[in-house]
Each structure stands twice: as C-alpha cells, then as structure tokens.
Image (tube, helix red, strand yellow):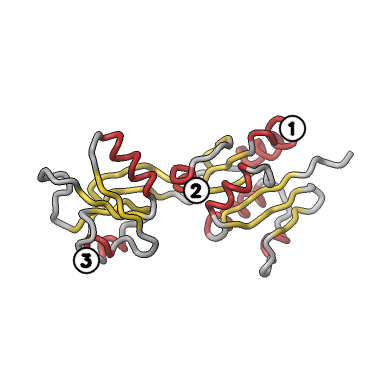
Amino acid sequence: MEKKKIRIALTKGRIENKAVDLLEKSGYDVTDLREKGRRLILTIPNENIEVVLAKAADVITYVEHGVCDLGVVGKDTIMEHGGKFHEIADLGFGKCKFALAVKKGTDFYSGYGVKTVATKYPEVTRNFFENKGIDVDIVKIEGSVELAPLVSLSDGIVDIVETGTTLKENGLEVVEDVAPVSARLIANTVSIKLKQERILEIVNLIKENL
C-alpha cells in the first residue's frame, strides 16, 4: 500500500541546511535536497514525501492553508506572525534570542517620556512591553536595525541576537533578553487528524534523532 503523501515546508537558508541534516540522520534519502539547484520542490524517494523551500513567513502560510502538512520555521517567525497550526517540537537548532539593545552607556528605563523602539518585529516588541505595562512607540525597520539608535531614530532596538558581535561593533549593548528562539516543527491542524499515523511516524523519527 502506498504511503500517504506528506509535504514538508522548510525555511530556506541555515534552517533548511540543519533540517536536511536532521532528515538524513533520521534515515531519509536527502540526495535530491542536497543537489537541488534552483528547484523549490524536491522529493525524498520511496517515502512519498515532498519538500518545499520557502521564506520563513511563507512556511507558516503554506502549513496554515494545508498545502503543506509539516513545516520547519524559527520561533521568531511564529512569535511575530502567529497563526493556526500545531507547534509539535523544538528542534534545538537555529538557536538565538530576541533582545533589547541600546547605545552603550545609556539607560533605557530612565526618565518619564515614552521611549521609541526600532525593530523588524513589531508584534514581538509590542507584546514584550505590554507584558511589562510599559508604553513604547514602535518604528518598523526593514534593514539594519542597529542604525536606528545611532542616528537617534530610537532609544533602543529589539532584534535577533546570536553572538552580539554586530551590536558591539556598532556601539550597542544588550540590556535585556526578550525571548529565546530556535527552529520548531509545526503541523497543519487538519493534516494531524487526516494523516495522523503518517505524521506521527515522521515526527517520532525526527524526535529520536534530535
């Protein structure tokens, strides 16, 4: 009997590479995924599994709409975009954190005025300060967020920090951690019911090899 088809969306880039390593460790033939060229839809032979490569936010969209059954995406994207899906496992790679950073030697929490925070992640930032009961003005930045405090656009930034080198080189420092981030395995809510056995089989294999 042919196995039910499963489609997995992977976030392109570093998360994709780590996910492919994990799939290989779990016993899957990832030759097609390693020799992908410019193709965006790849196959795992003999397993009836298709792998779709997409941008992080789109991975959530594909899983939410049910065109993909499973997805691998960073917790940062989940926190920023939300959505209706099941978060099944923390895959433990792609580790970094959201942090609040300011110009070295400045006190973000001093004074009475409303502070301005620049970020690529307005939802994460809003939730963080709302939970603290602090009112802030949020400015959304698309490029290098580190610039904002340097040109006096903002009092601080909320951004993804891995090593902190970029911050240091630009005269900024972390004053507070906002949330830890790592890659997560997510699943479509309907797929979990309709393809339960097949999804469990894949998920258990992956979990065993984390």
Coordinates of residue 201 in the picture (x, y in percent): 71, 36
Looking at this rendering, what residue extends furthest in the left direction? 111
Q: Are marks 2 and 1 in contact (CB under 8 Å)?
A: no
Which dot, 1 or 3, sits closer to the camera? 3
Residue 88 visible somewhere in the drawing: no
Disc 3 versus disc 2: distance between alpha carbons?
A: 30 Å
Disc 2 versus disc 1: distance between alpha carbons?
A: 25 Å
Report helix, strand or loop for mark 2. Answer: strand
Disc 1 versus disc 3: distance between alpha carbons?
A: 53 Å
Q: Which residue type does callout 1 highlight? A: Leu
Q: Which mark is residue 78?
A: none
Looking at this rendering, what residue extends furthest in the right direction? 1
Crowding at label 2, few (<14), some or many (≥20) Cα neighbours within 10 Å?
many
Report helix, strand or loop for mark 3. Answer: loop
**In terms of sequence position, does the residue under pointer 3 or pointer 2 come before the other?**
2
Crowding at label 1, few (<14), some or many (≥20) Cα neighbours within 10 Å?
few
Q: Which residue type does callout 3 highlight? A: Val
What residue does disc 2 label? 74
What residue does disc 3 label? 151
Coordinates of residue 79 in the picture (x, y in percent): 44, 42
